[in-house]
Image (spheres, helix red, strand yellow):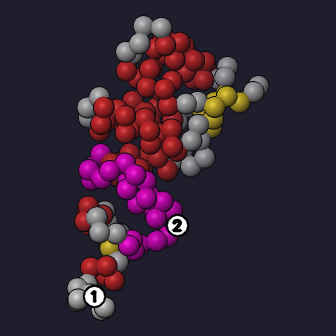
Amino acid sequence: MSLVFLDTNVLLRHLLQDHPEQSPKATAFLAHVESGDVRARTSDTVVFETVFTLQRHYGVPREEIRDALLPLIELPALVLPGKRRLRKVFGLYVEHGLPFADAYHAALMERLGLDEIATFDDHFDRVHGIRRSSCLLQDSGPAET
């Protein structure tokens, strides 16, 4: 069985059901993936783009995005390295209100055993086990010329 790359627009057409020709085809394709008749490969960037588009362009609430995407991502015939990590990412995205990319970074840090992040984004303060680097938080005084 061959491996087919799954692009963002197929996920969007399926989830939104907003195109009279493409949406039914997208849903049928994903049904083949769900049944195991087709194996598909996708990437983190496809997931990111899907989340971003649903949230920013369509105003879909975070919980609905999580509840719609996770079952698709977890299909056995969908190949996505690190897909198990995405459950944690979606949890941080929904429960702590982190931007999706930062939720991904927090989950990746946990996997890598890192607990300090160099960032000015204070929403990381809401994530247990992560602290922002003190080097960035200290007053550095006036810049030397």
Left or right of 75, for residue 15 = left
Whole-percent x, y for residue 142 in the image: 23, 89
Q: Kindly identify the amino acid type of the residue bearing the numbered disc 2.
A: Leu
* Residue 117 magenta: yes
Please tell me how crowded label 1 is: few (under 14), some (14-19), or many (20+) other residues with Cα within 10 Å. few
Occupied quadrant, residue 56 = top left
Q: Would you say the residues marked 2 and 1 are in contact, meaning their CB atoms lie under 8 Å apart?
A: no
Q: Which percent across, then down, holds residue 84?
A: 52, 47
Residue, x 67% and y 19% (percent of image)?
Answer: 37
Q: Is residue 92 above or below residue 20?
A: below
Estimate the x, y position of residue 102 in percent, counting from the top left. Answer: 37, 56
Q: Is residue 99 magenta?
A: yes
Q: Is residue 21 visible?
A: yes
View extreme (top): residue:
20
The numbered disc on residue 112 is 2
Badge 1 marks a residue whose secondary structure is loop
- The image quarter containing residue 54 is top left
Image quarter in which the C terminus is found: bottom left
Which residue is painted at 56% across and 49% down in the image?
Answer: 82
User: Vertically, is 102 above or below 6?
Assistant: below
C-alpha distance separating marks 2 and 1:
34 Å
Q: Which residue is label 1 attached to?
A: 143
Q: Residue at x 58, y 30 (%)?
A: 6
Residue 71: x and y in percent read 46, 32
Q: Nearer the viewer, residue 72 or 102?
A: 102
Q: Which residues are magenta?
A: 94-118
